[in-house]
Image (cartoon, helix red, strand yellow):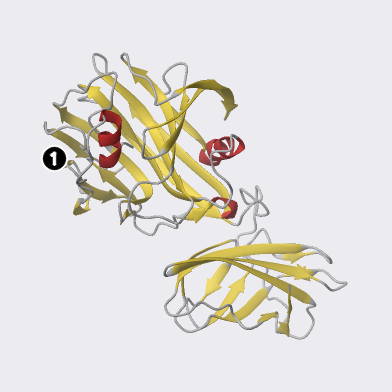
Amino acid sequence: MRRAIRALAALGLLAGAVVTAFAVAGPAAADTQICEQYGSTTIGGRYVVMNNRWGTSAQQCINVTSTGFSIQTQQGTGNTSGAPVSYPAVYLGCHYTNCSPGTNLPMQVSAISSATSSISYQYVSGATYDAAYDIWLDPSPKKDGVNQQEIMIWFNRQGSIQPIGSVVGNATIGGRNWEVWRGSNGSNAVVSYVAPSPITSWSFSVLDFINDTKNRGAITSSWYLTSIQAGFEPWIGGAGLAVTNFSASVNGGGPTGPTTPPTTPPTTPPTTPPTGGTSACRVTYGTNVWNSGFTANVTVANTGSSAINGWNLGFTLPSGQSITSSWNATLTGSSGAITARNVSYNGSIAPGANTSFGFQGTYSGSFANPPSFTLNGSTCSRA
């Protein structure tokens, strides 16, 4: 996505004032039209669709559906040796404080066990544009302003346009070959992956592209994924371009968690865990804390001589803390007394083994860790 400050950098203009506000509508009904420059709405109770006409004063209108959007009219004209005129897109995550409903982003890269997306594009002829994903990352859990690293995945490009920077090599990701570009627009770094021929639909791992960018030294595991976006960058024309279907999901739990549950998981978690005094355990409680938010990664180790089959971990959050989302466990309570129960695929912990779960939350005042943990009624030691 090209944001307003990025347009000014790309065109070499002075960025004295940058408009980053959005006109936010309610959830989209069938065939909702958006013509406002930064107008947006939500679809599916999960994603945001934005018009994002940042690079031209000419009219652009999009037609929003329940699964995506189409460009109804695009009257701007961009210089093909410079920046495009807009980036109408659908996204999961946060963009200039406009966060998609219920999102768990930003999330630290080290905490991500899987990040997947599925897309179906509709293309047109006679226009100059690219069809691209934008994946945004930053050293901090940033919800506003320009992130420091942009990953672009060009599914299609038409006309005499090219990514920012220069070609640095090739990569095979998701079973496909990509030409890799790298550069900077003056406000953020960009790594672009360009498909050799148009891709109309694909389900893939976003995390694979993040990991490739990390392996190139552009980011580290301590950075945060802030949004996954899919749309178009038109230079000339573009009416009729459409995202007909989009989905994205980011799951926490880090590299120790399974990326998918077992093929045939049980329909319910193990029945009733032991009720007290029998578990020998050790808990490691790791946190990342910022402003008024935090993430916690909890590792439960079995230090006993017998397997644990089904577990409940009890703890109390300090005053002012509240959980907003979790992964790899079913949590009861969001503040105060919390019980974390295993899910279908991590209920057994062999002697000497461990399992992990995590959650994201908010806090006020001074941040502190829970004072103690009990596993199936027995107090655990702390790592």
Residue 90: image quadrant is: top left
Q: Residue 238 location in percent, x, y? A: 22, 24
The residue shown at (56%, 47%) is 114
Q: Quadrant of residue 279?
A: bottom right
Specify whether 173 is left or right of 159: right
- Helix, strand or loop under label 1: loop
Which percent across, then down, holds residue 247?
A: 41, 43
Placement of 121 over or under 263, stated as above or below: above
For label 1, the residue is 35
Residue 123 or 286: which is nearer the viewer? 286
Give the percent coordinates (x, y) of residue 306: 85, 71
Q: Quadrant of residue 329?
A: bottom right
User: Visible in this render: residue 221?
Assistant: yes
Whole-percent x, y for residue 274 in the image:
73, 79
Q: Could you tell me how many numbered marks the image carries? A: 1
Q: Residue at x 49, y 67 (%)?
A: 294
Residue displayed at 27% across by 18% down? 80
| Vertical comparison of 338 with 92: above or below | below
Residue at image position (38%, 30%) is: 132
Q: Quadrant of the N terminus?
A: top left
Asked if one can make out residue 241 in the rendered structure from this viewpoint, the answer is no
Is 301 on the left or on the right of 220, as rendered? Answer: right
Q: Quadrant of the C terminus?
A: bottom right
As drawn, which residue projects farthest toward the left?
A: 58
Residue 220 vs residue 353: left or right? left
